[in-house]
């Protein structure tokens, strides 16, 4: 796996290849993801349905959308991750141009056909068309709880306190949260901690500091959680994270 990150951290390309991995049920809190299968196939599980996808297929993952993906050694997938802050009125019209520029920078690192760029942009266009579709929105109380857990992910939080804020029992909260997010509140907290640590490591922070800063005090537990969610060990992720460099031949 390789990671190519824009200097503002808002756009990221992930190349998944030469790995056999079942990315168990999870979600992406702050990103839309458009994935294009360059080679081979994968299985996508979403909304209680398993889909068999093959070369040239595209799939879209929206923030908080519970899903799992199974890939094998023969597969190669390019994923475009877009921070949801870019899906606002000020940036929306410029988003395709921004992505094209970053795609050109990525093409300096790996060989990609322009047809791949077009497929990714078609996925982005679909996201733009459905950005206000209520079918893709979380219930407000669940989103509020998810945000509170995210804010307190490196510390502790009380299920009793969270459930009282939405006027349900903690057991009802756990069931409802899992039905919408795909994870229990505790599992979601672990995922957020790992993603925060992943961001810190990509920015050059030492592995031990990234772990401790995000509430992990046992290195083996951190390694296990990180590899389960990200797909590779923290040390490998550190080696495979690259910041996209501006293309000197592209227009400003």
Image: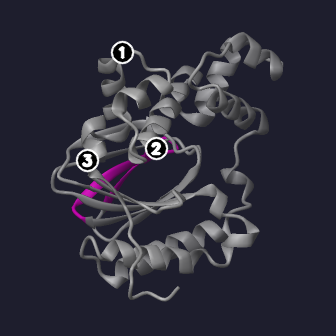
Image spot of residue 35 (x, y percent)? 41, 61
Residue 42: x, y in percent? 29, 53
Residue at the image position 36 percent from the left and 34 percent from the top: 206
Compared to 169, does 11 lie above or below?
below
First in sequence: mark 1 vs mark 3:
1
Q: Is residue 78 left or right of residue 28?
A: left
* Left/right of residue 217 with respect to residue 169 in the rendered view: left
x 70%, y 48%: residue: 137
Q: Position of residue 192 (x, y in %)?
A: 53, 33
Residue that mark 2 sits on: 199
Residue 87, given in percent of the width and then of the height, sits at 66, 64
- Spatial CA distance of label 3 from label 2 is 13 Å
**Which label number is shown at residue 218?**
1
- Residue 32 picture quarter: bottom right
- The circle drawn on residue 61 is none
Tag of residue 239? 3
| Callout 2: SS | helix
Q: Mark 1 Cα within 10 Å, few/some/many (few <14, many 20+)?
A: few
Q: Is residue 95 above or below residue 136?
A: below
Q: Is residue 41 magenta?
A: yes
Q: Is mark 1 in CB contact (under 8 Å) with mark 3?
A: no
Say what secondary structure mark 3 lies in: helix
In three-dimensional space, the C-alpha distance between marks 1 and 3, rounded to whole angstroms, equals 22 Å
Relative to residue 65, is residue 210 drawn left or right?
left
Magenta stretch: give its range. Answer: 39-53
């Amino acid at each position: 796996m390789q990671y190519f990150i824009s200097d503002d951290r808002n756009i990221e390309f992930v190349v998944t290849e030469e790995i056999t991995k079942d990315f168990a049920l999870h979600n992406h809190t702050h990103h839309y993801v458009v994935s294009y299968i360059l080679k081979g196939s994968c299985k996508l599980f979403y909304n209680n349905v398993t889909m068999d996808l093959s070369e040239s297929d595209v799939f879209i993952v929206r923030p908080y959308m519970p899903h799992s993906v199974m890939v094998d050694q023969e597969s190669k997938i390019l994923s475009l991750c877009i921070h949801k802050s870019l899906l606002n009125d000020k940036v929306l019209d410029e988003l395709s141009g921004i992505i094209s520029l970053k795609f050109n920078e990525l093409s300096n690192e790996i060989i990609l056909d322009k047809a791949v760029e077009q497929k990714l942009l078609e996925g982005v266009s679909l996201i733009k068309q459905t950005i206000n579709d209520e079918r893709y929105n979380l219930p407000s109380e669940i989103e509020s709880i998810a945000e509170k857990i995210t804010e307190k992910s490196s510390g502790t939080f009380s299920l009793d306190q969270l459930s009282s804020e939405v006027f349900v029992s903690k057991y009802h909260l756990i069931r409802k949260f899992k039905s919408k997010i795909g994870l229990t509140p505790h599992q979601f907290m672990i995922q957020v901690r790992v993603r925060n640590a992943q961001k810190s490591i990509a920015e050059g922070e030492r592995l031990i500091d990234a772990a401790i800063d995000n509430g992990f005090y046992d290195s083996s537990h951190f390694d296990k959680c990180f590899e389960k969610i990200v797909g590779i060990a923290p040390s490998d992720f550190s080696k495979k994270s690259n910041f996209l460099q501006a293309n000197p031949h592209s227009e400003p």
